[in-house]
């Protein structure tokens, strides 16, 4: 009996070694098979490459704790690219990037340059930026890193990408059924459905995140997202307003309320209910502080004033916007440029036009818009026969931005003024 127990213990101890050996042999088999592919694969070779890549995916799942998984995923991505299956290549690359942040980007970036073709053309720069972004250091577990890859995928759309991205989400829920942040991953899955135009599936997914996770802190967010789909995608104003009202009623202290007021204001504005829109924009501005959503609410308020021909109020609102967001050069300058455009086109007030431009230049003298602001101010001074100020502005432009392409135009105008 003692000898039998010793033998069983020896077998139990050796079993992992045997499995590890089998895993290594299997991976070596895939590597050798990959080497048989020609440099320019034809249709049959591409189909073979895809089969090998699919097999490597199975190998990686079966051997999830093996260090060689990183090499397997890299080979899988290469094979999917060879197969011109760019959608699955992209999903694999995002998983590899997040699971192994130490992976050599010089090996991954050339593959990503091909795989990004799976994404809609307008989103390819966004996809590349998401891929290049540093993986947060606080993501310690494989589940957390896998979830981060899914977060990136949830932002992207593509006719062929949607299916493998959805498969990656479903596989995650099978692999990590007890993940502590599954409710958040469920919301991201809804985002994936939404950006790919499957709006009813997105609504269902957001409901799932709210109803199946009773302790989730994202119940208000999931409800607001449903309202957004009704408002923006399905153009169902009644259901949108009903859902937004439900958020305000059930979650009055939620961080979502400011967003809800902004979105309700947009619906009101679109339906020409301008008084109600102004009230809701003001509530949004009060709650949102200096967030990007607050900036949008300020601009929306100015837009309502413009539509109702209250140009003075619109102009003043844009100046208030610039002041509120003075720490953000781009937003502050944009608001003042909108005010200047309003003054010139709607108010026919050259002085207010100049005041807005001067304020933008004064607040952000080194911003990217500064050369154009200087040039436009010089032209405006000329139109008012303020030639000395125009010349001085052109000189400042030439001295401070000598390599800017607009500096040559400023030099031409300065030469004319100095004749």
Image (cartoon, rainbow, N blue to C red):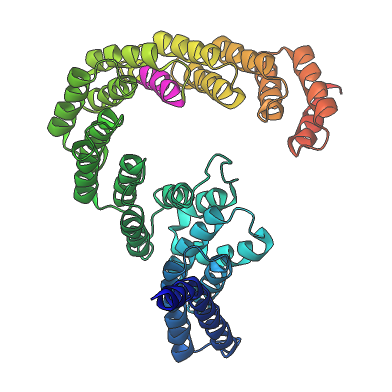
Give the percent coordinates (x, y) of residue 236. 16, 37
**Which quarter of the image is occupied by the N terminus?**
bottom left
Q: Is residue 297 magenta?
A: yes
Is 37 on the left or on the right of 289, as rendered? right
Residue 106 appears left or right of 73? right
Question: What stretch of residues is rendered in magenta?
Answer: 292-303
Rendered view: 23 above or below 32: above
At x 65%, y 59%, the residue is: 105
User: Is-magenta flag for residue 188?
Assistant: no
Q: Main secondary structure of the magenta part?
A: helix
Place of residue 355 in the rendered image (x, y in percent of width and height, measured from the top left): 60, 11
The one of 198 and 26 positioned closer to us in this rendering: 26
* Above or below: residue 264 compared with residue 117: above
Q: Residue at x 43, y 19 (%)?
A: 346
The location of residue 277, given as percent across then percent down, is 26, 17
Name the image quarter holding residue 173: bottom left
Displayed quadrant of residue 317: top left
* Observer-nearest of 284 and 342: 284
Question: Which one is in front, 200 or 361?
Answer: 200
Q: Is residue 259 left or right of residue 6?
A: left
Is the C terminus in the top left, top right, bottom left or bottom right quadrant?
top right
Q: Where, by quadrant of the figure, is residue 12 drawn?
A: bottom left
């Amino acid at each position: 009996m003692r000898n039998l127990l010793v033998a069983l213990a020896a077998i139990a101890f050796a079993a992992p070694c045997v499995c590890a050996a089998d895993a290594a042999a299997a991976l070596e088999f895939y590597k050798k098979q990959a080497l048989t592919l020609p440099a320019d694969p034809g249709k049959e070779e591409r189909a073979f490459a895809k089969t090998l890549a699919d097999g490597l995916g199975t190998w990686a799942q079966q051997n999830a704790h093996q260090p060689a998984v990183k090499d397997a995923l890299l080979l899988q991505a290469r094979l999917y690219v060879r197969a011109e299956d760019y959608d699955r290549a992209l999903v694999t690359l995002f998983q590899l990037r997040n699971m192994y942040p130490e992976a050599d980007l010089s090996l991954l970036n050339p593959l990503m340059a091909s795989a990004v073709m799976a994404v809609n053309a307008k989103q390819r720069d966004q996809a590349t930026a998401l891929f290049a972004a540093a993986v947060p250091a606080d993501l310690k577990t494989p589940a957390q890193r896998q979830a981060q890859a899914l977060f990136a995928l949830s932002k992207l759309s593509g006719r062929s990408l949607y299916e493998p991205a959805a498969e990656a989400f479903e596989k995650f829920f099978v692999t990590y059924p007890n993940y502590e942040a599954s409710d958040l991953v469920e919301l991201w899955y809804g985002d994936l459905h939404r950006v790919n135009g499957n709006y009813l599936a997105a609504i269902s997914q957001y409901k799932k995140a709210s109803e199946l996770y009773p302790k989730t802190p994202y119940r208000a967010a999931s409800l607001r997202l449903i309202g957004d789909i009704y408002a923006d995608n399905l153009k169902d104003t009644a259901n949108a307003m009903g859902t937004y009202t439900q958020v305000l009623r059930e979650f009055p202290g939620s961080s979502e309320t400011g967003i809800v007021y902004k979105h309700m204001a947009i619906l009101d504005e679109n339906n020409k209910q301008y008084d109600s829109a102004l009230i809701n924009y003001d509530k949004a501005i009060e709650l949102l502080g200096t967030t990007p959503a607050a900036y949008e609410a300020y601009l929306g308020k100015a837009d309502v004033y413009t539509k109702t021909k209250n140009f003075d109020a619109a102009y003043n609102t844009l100046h208030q916007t610039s002041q509120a967001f003075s720490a953000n050069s781009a937003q502050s300058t944009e608001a003042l440029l909108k005010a200047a455009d309003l003054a010139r086109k709607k108010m026919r007030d050259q002085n207010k036009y100049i005041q807005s431009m001067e304020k933008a230049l004064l607040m952000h003298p080194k911003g990217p818009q500064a050369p154009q602001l200087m040039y436009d101010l010089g032209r405006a001074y000329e139109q008012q026969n303020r030639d000395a100020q125009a010349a001085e502005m052109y000189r400042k432009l030439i001295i401070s931005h000598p390599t800017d392409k607009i500096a040559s135009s400023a030099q031409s105008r300065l030469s004319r003024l100095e004749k």
